[in-house]
Image (tube, rainbow, N blue to C red):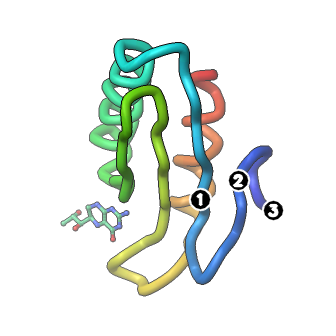
């Protein structure tokens, strides 16, 4: 099942997050980075000022796995 707010698209989960400013976006990215390191599962992402675009896919498997769903759910838990 696709976690709230995420879109399943071409073997990946994507979601865009928008914050008040860069500082809030960067703080969020820092927290996501710590989740990613703990899970040894890392996002494809980009940041423009207050916006963070995240794409989750499992490169080793060539598509979507439970690791992506788990990380998306954990990221939702930061909000
Ligand atoms: C060696 C290392 O565990 C692997 O390369 C991990 C690291 N993080 C990863 N992250 C993601 N998103 N997909 C992977 O396949 C992946 N593989």
Q: Mark 3 points at which residue?
A: 1
Q: Residues within 10 Å of mark 3 (few under 14, many from 20)?
A: few
For the C terminus, the image quarter is top right
- Label 1 CB sits under 8 Å from any ligand 1 atom: no
Query: Disc 1 vs disc 2: Cβ atoms closer than 8 Å?
Result: yes
Q: Residue 60 appears at what percent x and percent y?
A: 33, 79
Q: How many marks?
A: 3
Residue shown at 81%/62% (left/top)? Answer: 1
Q: Which mark is residue 46?
A: none
Residue situated in front as seen by the camera: 46 or 8: 46
Cα separation between marks 1 and 2 = 5 Å
In this rendering, position of residue 8 left or right of residue 63:
right
In the structure shown, which secondary structural element does the residue marked by tag 1 occupy? strand
Disc 1 crowd, CA 10 A, few/some/many (<14, 14-19, 20+)? many
* Separation of marks 3 and 1 at Cα, in angstroms: 14 Å
Left or right of 11 in this view: 57: left
As helix, strand or loop, the secondary structure at mark 3 comes to loop
22 or 73: nearer the eye? Answer: 22
Tell me the residue at 61%/50% (across/down): 15
Query: Where does residue 44 sit, x and y in percent of width and height?
Result: 36, 58
Kindly identify which numbered label has been placed on residue 14: 1
Q: Identify the residue under disc 2.
A: 6
Which element carries disc 2, helix, strand or loop? Answer: loop
The residue positioned 70% from the left and 53% from the top of the image is 6
């Amino acid at each position: 099942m696709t976690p709230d707010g995420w879109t399943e698209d071409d073997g990946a989960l994507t979601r865009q997050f928008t914050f008040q400013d860069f500082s809030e976006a960067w703080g969020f990215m820092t927290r996501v980075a710590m989740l990613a390191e703990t899970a040894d599962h890392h996002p494809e992402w980009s940041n423009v000022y207050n916006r963070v675009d995240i794409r989750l896919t499992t490169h080793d498997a060539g598509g979507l796995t439970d690791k992506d769903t788990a990380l998306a759910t954990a990221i939702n838990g930061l909000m």
